Amino acid sequence: METVVSGIRSTGKLHLGNYYGAIQNFIKMQHEYNCYFFIADLHSLTTHPTPADLHGNVKQVLVEYLAAGIDPERATIYIQSDVPEVAELYLYLNMNAYLGELERATSFKDKVRANPDNVNAGLLTYPVLMAADIIIHKATKVPVGKDQEQHLEMARTFGNRFNRLYDTEYFPEPYAFNYSNNLVKIPGLDGKGKMGKSEGEANAVYLSDSPEIIRKKVLKAVTDGGPTTENQEKPQEIQNLFDLMKVVSSADTYEHFDDLYNKMQIRYGDFKKQLAEDMIIATAPIREKINDIANDEAYLRQVARYGAAKARESASKTIKEVREIIGFRNF
Ligand code: TYM
């Protein structure tokens, strides 16, 4: 059975981008593959969270994984820092990761531009840690959104380089995965780029947002003055809202509003109202479970411990073999 690995950084509440880009696939894949889904808390250290924030954010992602339907009996759910073997593999892979290629990574360049005062080595070697996360379990499928495509390419590079250096075929190649064959990029509400945690609170719809908040955010989403000719191409901000409707609403609803747009009869107020209601319905089953799960500390502890033990079993087997391949020998 093929092995699947994916993770989400513990940087706060999860949004629709995380859900449709990643979690929706996790939930399906857990029935078909040997799955490892983790909380990337080591990755979140690049932005120096306080100990209290770090713990709170890890808990938030764990709660939302469970509320969204990841089943700890089917998939191995764990916290990255509970598996120190990952950090060891990261160290080995770093010996064969080069400054030039790391500096060229799009996500690194974006981070440098956004925060030039915090260009730390952890940020630079972020793709190496991500490669370690994936190949530690010898995964071949990695359910992620479109923004992670380049990181997957780098994970293949680092795994292949290790194989070549030690003349082995030890690590298989991991590929980004989505059931539809197209990696998705869920847009935000600001009329510009993707939905994200760093793009401002109002740009993202969180799985934990109340119906009132969702309505408020969607009604404030950027729109234009409306179509001026029939069948005209939609400007970015309108296309974004239609893209969101495509994932949360039924095909009939989408076609209805698309048709109105093409006939120049669309009323953005109605369109946004429908979009907000469908987002509320889509997130309701998750939202309703979040509080109960968050209050059950004993259950969360049990899930985290059980997952850590299973993940370490797999990771320590790899590390033992990797140490042998590299040439570390016991005296
Ligand atoms: P992160 O925490 O930024 O995002 C987690 C997952 O959500 C997806 N995603 C989106 N998909 C579509 N549209 C969006 N607007 C959107 N926003 C976020 C991301 O593609 C991702 O799948 N580096 C990773 C975490 C990570 C990881 C790994 C993932 C660390 N190690 C190993 C897979 C395998 C990250 O920062 O994701």
Image (spheres, rainbow, N blue to C red):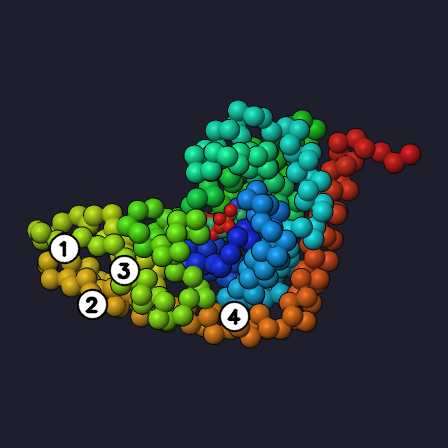
- Please tell me which of labels 4 and 2 falls first in the chain: 2
Question: Closest to the observer: 302 or 72?
Answer: 302
Q: Position of residue 298 (x, y in %)?
A: 68, 71
* Residue that appears at 62% across and 73% down: 296
Estimate the x, y position of residue 266 in percent, counting from the top left. Answer: 15, 62
Left or right: 10 in relation to 84: left
Q: CA distance from mark 1 to mark 2?
A: 13 Å
The residue labelled by disc 4 is 290
Instruction: Give the left or right position of residue 282, taking residue 3 as reference.
Output: left
Earlier in the chain: of badge 2 and badge 3, it is 3
Instruction: Report crowding for label 4: few under 14, some 14 to 19, many 20 or more residues within 10 A (C-alpha).
Output: some
Label 3 amino acid?
Answer: Lys
Disc tally is: 4
Q: Is mark 1 within 8 Å of ligand 1?
A: no
Kind of residue sitting beneath label 4: Ile
Residue designated by label 3: 220
Looking at the rendered structure, the kind of residue marked 2 is Asp
| x 49%, y 59%: residue | 13
- Find disc 2 in the rendering and name its residue: 270
Residue annotated with mark 1: 226
Residue 308 image-quadrant placement: bottom right
- The alpha-carbon separation of the residues under discs 4 and 2 comes to 30 Å
